[in-house]
Image: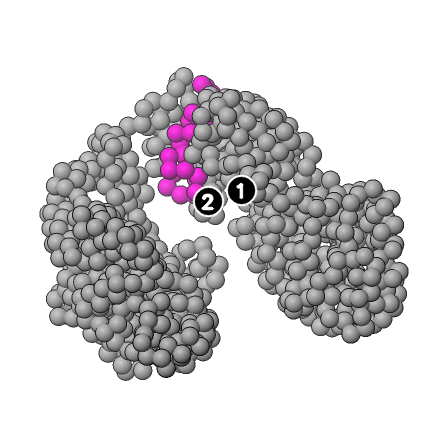
Amino acid sequence: MSQAPVSTVEPQPEPRSLLRCPRCHAGLRQTTAVSMTCQGGHAFPVIDGIPDLMPEARLADPARLLSPAVDLTVLLLTWNEADNLPILIPRIKAVVERLGVTSEILVIDKESPDGTAQVAASLGARVARQTEPGFGGALRMGFGLARGRFICTMDADLSHEPEVLESLWKARQQAALVIGSRWVKGGGADMPLYRSTLSRILNRIYGLALQVPYRDMSSNCRLYRAEALRTLEPQGTNFDVLEDLLMRVVNQGHAVIEVPLHHRQRHAGKSHVRLLAFALSYLRTLVRLRHLRHSPEAGDRELQAYHALNPVRRWLERRRARLLQTRVGSRAGCLYVNCGSDPLLGMLPDATGVDTRLSRLRAARPQHRPLVRGSLAALPFQDGSYELVLWGQSQDGVADADHPLDELVRVVAPGGRLVIRAGGHPKALATSLRQHGLAVEAPRRLSPGEWVVTADRTEASPLPLSRPGAQPDRARTIGLGTASITPAQRRYVNDVLDKNRLSYGEYTRRFEREFARLHERTFAIFCNSGTSALQVAVHAMKEHFGWKDGDEILVPAITFVASANVVLQNGLVPVFVDVEPDHFGIDPDQLAGHLSPRTRAVMPVHLFGQPCDMDPILAFASDHDLRVLEDSCETMFVRHKGRVTGSWGEIACFSTYVAHLTVTGVGGFATTNDLGLATLMKSLMNHGRDNIYLSIDDDDTDNVDRLQQVVARRFSFVHVGYSYRATEMEAALGVGDLEQHQDMLRRRAENAAYLTSRLRDLEHVLQLPGIRPQTEHAFMMYPLVVRQGVEREPLIMHLEQAGIETRHLMPLINQPVYRRLFGDLEPQYPVAARLNRAGFAIGCHQGLTREDLDHVADSFHAYFRSQSVA
């Protein structure tokens, strides 16, 4: 079981290496308890005793800081407590006076009919009327209104004797949350045996399930450090909010301690707790909190694994720690990068821990090692300052830096060692380490899917980075997309600024009309992103066609996450369908296998610039009375069997984001032929406003009757909508971009054809993009798949180092969030699984020259020559 941190504010040991500014590399010194300053004048915060030396870290502007008005807020949540407050509040004041602190008593009252609010006010308390439902709502209100550096909560019925506040206050420097506990030594409760037994059992169940050592998690007698609450968003309407708050405090890495409390019988009035309902709610909440507790956001995630109740997991974690210790040898002076709360940090000799995540550094404090918040973008240490550097590559999606090895090698001392926990592809990592001038041992498996790679620095400085068959070309960047602003676009944007009409106006109307015409639609509605267009499209279809929560939409297993996210966000269920192995569209032959009585629509996604095979999709939808929603964010203008993309479904959605085909910076379209859907979507994009006033020009009329209706209804909102409007400046850019769309398509097609001709001799190692019959391809990107036996990651690294940007082929079902929601889906979708492992894309946009394309092709050939594959 993970152990509770002892302290959040005690001084920590000094790092072995002199700290350096991550911006200018000058020396740093601590100037106050909460700040550090470098010789170059850059200032950084110290948070909970931990220096925050991320390159982007800044001290908060003192002018914008709201200082707490008092030392302590005593927060009371009341309902019909008029008889208890005249006894309770004077006793609280007496305790506070003995403590010698400034304070306030804040009462959140649920409109008590017995005059509780009036009694509290007469006794000098601040009183606020409860407007949020339940105990949880009242508690959140109180936290928002409290003005103290510390907030003490206690029951208003005298079951918590005010004198316990002295014990809570005495322990305040040891933890961010101090709990008055009935079930620790010295505590107790005046309650029937069955109630105390039930409470102990429930707390024990919670402790085991959530891997925390606390005895009384449902106690409302607590002292919070207000600063620790600032970033928390507690959930729960009833008393379950107490356990939720506790888990969020623990997940942030804060220390929690318990002090004895004797819980008394309420002094007057009736208890508001319904025991059976409380117990059932308590158990239901456990499922939600267990998910929260074991999420990647948990600050003590590594500590949980090391002390796991699951013996296999516990054995694997401890074996990993032992194996890594053997790689350290007798070296003193260690730097553990991405240390998290790993107990290994405390086992390493003279170690310093670095992590980007403050919550995990807080959780590592009990190991009594120097801790620094820092990034591999610029480690805040001197060159060659550590004999051992251990890098625990992030297992939960936290990016370290674009070129992490550069910084790691820099801080390794001559003769020192670099040890890396790698999640996969150890051979590619070993190759990169050799290119940095290190002597690399054979990788060793730590656990399933995890390796350890060890490299020794044998020279005074690392060798310059070299790549097989390619010379560094840092100046060259061949991106996935491009944006070139024409003179016409500059003129249109300046026209918008000159006319001072920044919201919906003539350019938006012109952009919408022309885009609708090019895609053979009656209506095109411009908004701030393709994702927003998808969001309102699903919302509108659900409302228009009467779908219910839990109804299903068939979505391809390869697509951008937004395609499935918007389904979930609208209370529907995405049901994934495998894709075609050659063109990557949703596979029509797989649709029937995923049909259910709750299926309501199909969402074909036209990826990379090529439309899906629409005839069988439309036939399937027609046979089963399904709607069709096209996600065409990556494909515009092109035709399939004579019809333009986006003209098949009830609604089609497009994106004009950077790197797409038409570029406005940000932006998107929803298109349709249905007036009802068009009106509903436009309303939803505009806060759900009454459709009589969807443009600021709608009240520009000489018709008095019409004007009277507009004035009466223009601030009437008939739907729960969004603010998804774009500006006239994006529309002006779009109008200019549409004027050159034919030339853009031609040049992309020419570039793709040239790349294919140059790479044709590599088809035994690369699957080149295919074009389905009777179909035009816009080539938003140039998709590739490595053949069996070829590793994708070393090839991608080679291309990136040659200045060629890459992107994985839209993985969806293996994303961490979808694994949490649906489990491991890849075995059910073999084509998507293969593309997730082997697919990637490069750019072939109109901004590339023939020289650029030759560089791309030459880089591929150089790589495969070096691998003896070509």
Identity of the residue drawn at 19% across and 35% down? 862
- Say above or below: 322 vs 538: above
Query: Which sits in the foreground, 407 or 830?
Result: 407
Secondary structure at badge 1 equals: loop
Quadrant occupied by the C terminus: top left
Q: Position of residue 712 (x, y in %)?
A: 44, 77
Q: Which residues are magenta?
A: 399-426
For label 1, the residue is: 357
- Say above or below: 398 vs 27: below
Is residue 405 shown left or right of residue 48?
left
Q: Residues within 10 Å of mark 1 (few under 14, many from 20)?
A: many
Whole-angstrom CA distance, mark 2 to mark 1, is 9 Å
Secondary structure at badge 2 equals: loop
Query: Which sits in the foreground, 676 or 188?
Result: 676
Residue 240 in view in this figure = no
Residue 475 in view in this figure = yes
Is residue 737 shown left or right of residue 111?
left
For label 2, the residue is: 398
- Badge 2 vs badge 1, beta-carbon distance below 8 Å: yes
| Amino acid type, callout 2 | Val
The answer to if 89 sits in the magenta stretch is no
Q: Image quarter for residue 836? A: bottom left
Q: Position of residue 581 (x, y in %)?
A: 25, 60
| Amino acid type, callout 1 | Arg
Q: Image quarter for residue 123? A: bottom right
Query: Which sits in the foreground, 804 or 418?
Result: 804
Is residue 373 shown left or right of residue 142?
left
